[in-house]
Amino acid sequence: MGYFVFLLGSLAAIWFGLSGMTKPLILAFGAVSVILSAILAYRFDILDRESSPYARLPQLAAYWAWLVVEIFKANWIVIKACLRSNLDINPALVKVKTVCESDLAKTVFANSITLTPGTVSVAVEGDKILVHALYEEEAGPGAFDEMDRRSRLASDGRSKA
């Protein structure tokens, strides 16, 4: 029931934010469309943790704030590599094991790797993500453990398996 209520609130906020209409008739049409959409989502049985992640917005916001700091740190490494007179990069493809269980958590983790400069998620195969890294030593074992743990906590609500 909580997912249904969060879906109703989110749809109403998005509808009002995009339309900005305050006339009673238009508001009534908007309310009917929001309620109908939420009822259809409930009847199709598609309301779950992944389709309605609004309850975890505080955890996701905290994760994205942490990720912004990590992106700036990685930017510094890439900027230094670009400004050096010799190109001393050591690219590598590495497989990173993840503890994320849901597809949402795996997607958040893989996208976080790609957002971080110097690394790109190439493929997701089960519990492993193939990552192309600018520096092999920066993508060694344990390099993505903190990001994996935090993305799982933000997306799944659990920190350990």
Image: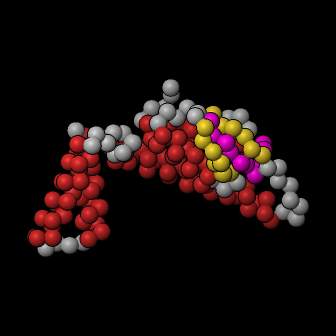
Residue at point 84% right, 63% down? 84
- Give the camera-side residue of 153 and 49: 49
- Give the camera-side residue of 106 and 71: 106
- Residue reaching furthest left? 24
- The span picked out in magenta is 128-137
Position in image of residue 149 (x %, y %): 54, 36
> Where on the picture, by quarter, is residue 15?
bottom left
Position in image of residue 40 (x %, y %): 23, 48
Above-or-below relation of 35 to 105: below
Q: What's the magenta bit mostly, secondary-structure-wise?
A: strand
Residue at point 45% right, 32% down? 158
Residue at point 15% right, 59% down? 32
- Residue reaching furthest top? 161
Residue at point 61% right, 37% down? 125
Q: Is residue 81 visible?
A: yes
- Give the camera-side residue of 101 and 46: 46
Position in image of residue 160 (x %, y %): 50, 28
- Residue reaching furthest right? 86
Q: Is residue 144 visible?
A: no
Q: Position of 96 compared to 48: left or right? A: right
